[in-house]
Image (spheres, rainbow, N blue to C red):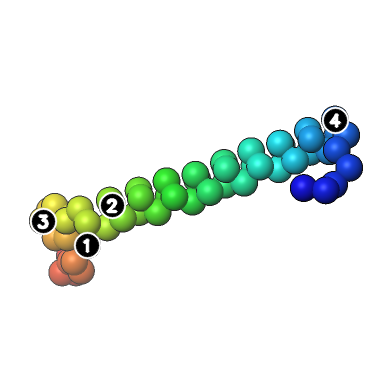
Amino acid sequence: MSMFMSTQSVQAETAYRQERIKREYGRANGRRLRAKKATKAEPLHARRSLRPTTAA
């Protein structure tokens, strides 16, 4: 890294990396949760309640 390093540039670089880490973690975590949710089967009563009902 042949860039001029000042304390402000170091702080900016650190902040940028922390933001990237947070964003990547959030994405990975969201994917994991969505995958976990997708593999869960719906209970039968939930499916039954979504069916159209007869007109009263």
Comparing marks 2 and 1, which lies closer to the viewer?
2
Residue 49 in sight here: no
Q: Earlier in the sequence, mark 4 or mark 1?
A: 4
Which kind of residue does numbered mark 2 sit on? Lys
Marks 3/1: CA–CA distance: 10 Å
Residue annotated with mark 4: 7
Residue occupying the point 28% across, 51% down: 36
Q: Is residue 47 left or right of residue 29?
A: left
Comparing marks 4 and 2, which lies closer to the viewer?
4
Residue annotated with mark 2: 37
Residue annotated with mark 3: 44
Marks 4/3: CA–CA distance: 60 Å
Residue at disc 3, secondary structure: helix
Which kind of residue does numbered mark 1 sit on? Leu
Front-most of residues 5 and 24: 5
Marks 2/1: CA–CA distance: 19 Å
Comparing marks 2 and 3, which lies closer to the viewer?
2
Q: Disc 4 vs disc 1: Cβ atoms closer than 8 Å?
A: no
Which kind of residue does numbered mark 3 sit on? Leu
Marks 4/2: CA–CA distance: 45 Å
Residue occupying the point 44% across, 50% down: 28
